[in-house]
Amino acid sequence: MQRSTLGRLAALITSVCAAVAVLFTGTATAAPAPAPTVDLAGAAVQLRAAAAGNPEAQDAVERLIGAPKDIATPVLSLPGQIFPIPAYSDTGQGGDVLGQLYGAGVATNMNNEFRFGFFGGPGSIADNQTGAELNVVWYSLANGTSGIARLDQNNKVIPTVISTAPLNVGNGMVVGAVYGSLWHKVGPNDTDVVKSTIWWPSMGVVMS
């Protein structure tokens, strides 16, 4: 069961990456500039102010801040940017090695519309999200603006991804963390749904 679930998750990641890759068709072939890096631990601290006043967002941010992270991540200016820190949930499956691996946040900037999104399993993301709520708390490292936005637009930009409405985050680096819960469709019937609750947020620093 764990291997089949991991296989589906791997296939899902592959499909999202493939969808993103299609966006590059016809782009210039000039060598890209070296990608900047940013300390994720320091970026997570910046989310504190953005989460203030929202207990669920504050709890998610504090979990990220309290974890040891001695890493820096490359930031790529691409139409689709997958968060390097994945989410873990009560329905995630990864065995003894990966634990309850669930999915990952993503940022897209298609048609000049910047959005945060999320993809993960089991099954597919259900269209009806009544009783569940998935959010992203974000902070612009470039201009200091911040906010919390709900991810409620399913299959809007990339198949298998649920996204926010377009956000005005300005230009530059933005740190985001996706937390909350999500319904998944796991069978042919309307009742074949499973609710996943994230206990470890997905986090990334992206370019807008």
Image (cartoon, grey):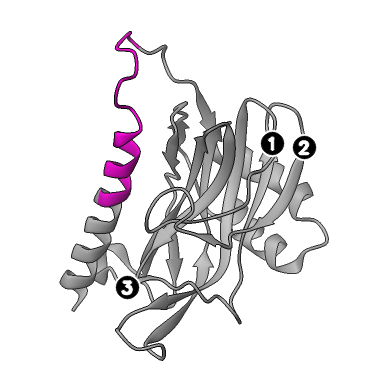
Q: Does label 1 or label 3 sit earlier along the sequence?
A: 3
* Picture layout, residue 153 above or below residue 114: below
- The magenta segment is 15-31
Q: Nearer the viewer, residue 41 or 14?
A: 14
From the top left corner, tell me how far across and down residue 107 is, in percent: 50, 42
Quick check: is 20 in the magenta stretch? yes
Disc assigned to residue 145:
2
* Picture layout, residue 9 above or below residue 21: below
How far apart are labels 1 and 3 at the CA level? Answer: 31 Å
The disc labelled 2 sits on which kind of residue? Thr
Horizontal relation, residue 125 to residue 186: left or right: right
Q: Does label 3 or label 2 sit earlier along the sequence?
A: 3
Q: Do residues under tags 1 and 3 come within 8 Å of each other at their CB atoms? A: no
Q: Quadrant of the N terminus?
A: bottom left
- Residue identifier under label 3: 123
From the top left corner, tell me how far across and down residue 40 is, in percent: 54, 39
- Residue identifier under label 1: 169
Q: Does label 1 or label 2 sit earlier along the sequence?
A: 2
Q: Secondary structure at mark 3?
A: loop
From the top left corner, tell me how far across and down residue 87 is, in percent: 45, 60
